[in-house]
Every structure is written in C-alpha cells, then in structure tokens.
Image (cartoon, rainbow, N blue to C red):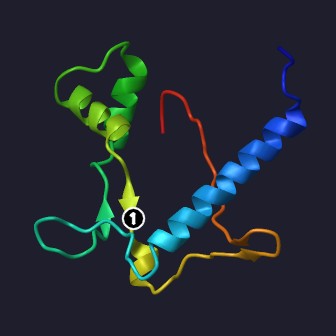
Amino acid sequence: MKKPSIATILVAVLIAAGLVTLYITQSRKGKETIPVSKETGIYVRLQQPKMLAYDELVALGTSAKASGELGDKLHAITTTPFLSNEAYYRGAKPLRPKLNQLGSSLRLVTWNIEQGL
C-alpha cells in the first residue's frame, strides 16, 4: 500500500480542523464558555494553589526529596490548574478572526512542557 504524502496529510488535517471549528462556532452561539462555580453560580475569578516561600524553595533545592507539608505544597503546585478569568471581568472578548477561505475560525496553540510549570 502506498504511503500518503505529507501534503495529503496536511490537507486532511486542515479540513478536519476547519470542520471542528465550524461545528464549535455553530453549536456555541450565544453561550458563555467561562467556568462557573457550582456553589455560587458566578464565574471563578482566580484559582491557584498557595505558592512556595523563599525558605521552602531553599529547602527543596538542598534536599533530594520533599516530604511532609512541603511535599504536599509541591504536589499541589504541580498538579493544580491555575485559572484566571480576570480578562473576562475587565470586559475582554475573544478574538474570532474571519478568514476568507474558512470563515469564522479559532486559533489553537499547545505547549508541551514536561515535568513542571
């Protein structure tokens, strides 16, 4: 069986991305997409774990393994998502460009950062 060329794969990926974008924009018209707190029903303004103090950072730098309360704080920092909706509260709106060939679009970026913040 003949392998598909890179151009064919790229075209297929672009078509799939365009279809996903079209589906998302059509299904979310008029809907808010910012996370809402289940308890209060309002948008979460800021969510983040407690940061490490300087002394704790020094302790982490001098020991091979973190344990106890310091280990718990380190685990919370590396596994808890940081969430900020400050831009929403300032009235910022997402940029949804309209491209001539695709129409309404959504630009996506990924960042693969391994084993840390």
Point out residue 106 in the picture as x, y percentages from the top left corner. Answer: 63, 65
Instruction: Reply above or below: 76 against 26.
Output: above
Horizontal side, residue 71 vs residue 61: left or right? left
Please name whichever residue, 68 or 41, is drawn nearer the observer in this view of the structure.
Answer: 41
Horizontal side, residue 72 vs residue 18: left or right? left
Please name whichever residue, 53 or 78, is drawn nearer the observer in this view of the structure.
Answer: 78
Residue sitting at 25 percent across and 36 percent down? 73
Residue sitting at 17 percent across and 24 percent down? 68
Near mark 1 (Cα within 10 A), the count class, few <14, some 14-19 or many ≥20, is: some
As shown in the figure, which amino acid type bears the numbered disc 1? Ser
In the rendered image, the residue lying farthest to the bottom is 91
Point out residue 117 in the picture as x, y percentages from the top left corner. Answer: 48, 39
Q: In the structure shown, which secondary structural element does the residue marked by tag 1 occupy?
A: strand
Please name whichever residue, 114 or 12, is drawn nearer the observer in this view of the structure.
Answer: 12
Query: How many tags in the picture?
Result: 1
- For label 1, the residue is 84
Point out residue 104 in the picture as x, y percentages from the top left corner. Answer: 66, 74
Residue 77 is drawn in which quadrant?
top left
In the rendered image, the residue lying farthest to the front is 1
Residue sitting at 37 percent across and 41 percent down? 54
Residue sitting at 67 percent across and 68 percent down? 105
Residue 46 is drawn in which quadrant?
bottom left
Instruction: Reply above or below: 28 against 61.
Output: below
Horizontal side, residue 105 vs residue 46: left or right? right
Query: Can you say which quadrant of the picture contains the N terminus?
Result: top right
Point out residue 113 in the picture as x, y percentages from the top left corner. Answer: 57, 35
Please name whichever residue, 98 or 74, is drawn nearer the observer in this view of the structure.
Answer: 98
